[in-house]
Amino acid sequence: MKFSNFVRVHWAAFRALLVLTVITGLAYPVFIWLVAQIPGLHDKAEGSILTVNGKPIGSRLIGQLFTDKDGNALPQYFQSRPSAAGTGYDPTSTSASNLGPESIVDTPADPAQLAAGKSASDAGFKPSLLTQVCTRSATVGQLEGVDGSRPFCTGGGVGAVLSVIGSRDARGNVTHPTQVISVNEPCQTTQTPFLTSYQGVRVQCAKYGEDYSIGQIVPIRGAAPANPSVPADAVTASGSGLDPDISPAYADIQVARVARTRHVSPDQIKSVLAQYRSGRDLGFFGEPTVNVLQLNLQLDRKYPVSS
């Protein structure tokens, strides 16, 4: 390449670099900053921060946990939905659980490590998504005084799942079971599985170290109502783990507890709740929601809990 052509090509590239730097590195950021100053957008651009006595306490766009140091729900507050972001609603660890509908079999804890004083998680216990939902539903039901039962959950709050071992047909279904195990109920925690028998075979509890994957994995629906009293957002986390809202249905079952703890009537709590209930965007996008942080802050202002 001739030197003159070399200079011409690189001078053109340099000019393109300057133009794109001005557009994308200066003009575009300044334009976005100016848009963010428009009334109605400025608060969101600044993070929608909520304050109490001038002190920032959270964002209207990011949820919070209202629990004590042991993770127990504080009874005077409406509870948020579960979160898989870090230890819960950590904006630096936004994530989902990455567990899907086929996650129905738990990884059991090592009984020896449990006997040594380790926690279930430290002993290797990893609950399936089904068991997480069942446990949360039972816990919420007990907290709110409603029926916490769900389809495919045992009364003890774990996934109602069997491993059915026996001869199979051409489609892989067990036709003559010889052994049936409740895989999510280990023998060290129960001697009486949630189901007495299955197709005439006695149901056994799971023994640690045994491989039950050779059987056909069968979830048992049970007698729970098709529409549980505990709504879905009370037992499942959002994709980001930061959802600041809950459904009106989840808020409604918490009214009695919050009213009782704050020594006011349920109607008084409902009147505050109505202020922070949002409808569908444009009338048809999404679902109605309730902002938990804003609701709890208003309750503290209007009906504080005496210490």
Image: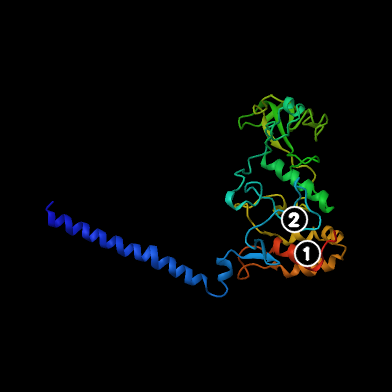
Q: Quadrant of residue 170?
A: top right
Going 81% across and 55% down the picture, which residue do you hit? Answer: 75
**Rendering coords of residue 247 (x, y %):** 71, 60
Give the number of the disc on residue 290: none
| Kind of residue sitting beneath label 1 | Asp
Q: Residues within 10 Å of mark 1 (few under 14, many from 20)?
A: few
Q: CA distance from mark 1 to mark 2?
A: 14 Å
Q: Is residue 134 left or right of residue 286?
A: right
Please give the residue where the numbered disc 2 appears in the rendered image: 79
Residue 123 location, x and y as percent? 70, 31
* Residue labelled with disc 1: 300
Residue 303 coordinates in the image, percent (x, y): 82, 66
In what element is the residue under mark 2?
loop
Residue furthest to the front: 54
- The vertical placement of 303 against 102, above or below, is below
Quadrant of the drawing holding the C terminus: bottom right
Q: Foreground mark, 1 or 2?
A: 1
Q: Earlier in the sequence, mark 1 or mark 2?
A: 2
Q: Residue at x 62, y 31 (%)?
A: 172
| Label 2: how many Cα within 10 Å (few below 14, some 14–19, many 20+) | many
Measuring from the top left, give residue 157's x and y in whole percent: 77, 41
Task: Kindly state the secondary structure of the residue where label 1 is placed.
Answer: helix
Regarding residue 21, the answer to whether it shows in the image is yes
Question: Is residue 147 at least partly visible in the picture?
Answer: no
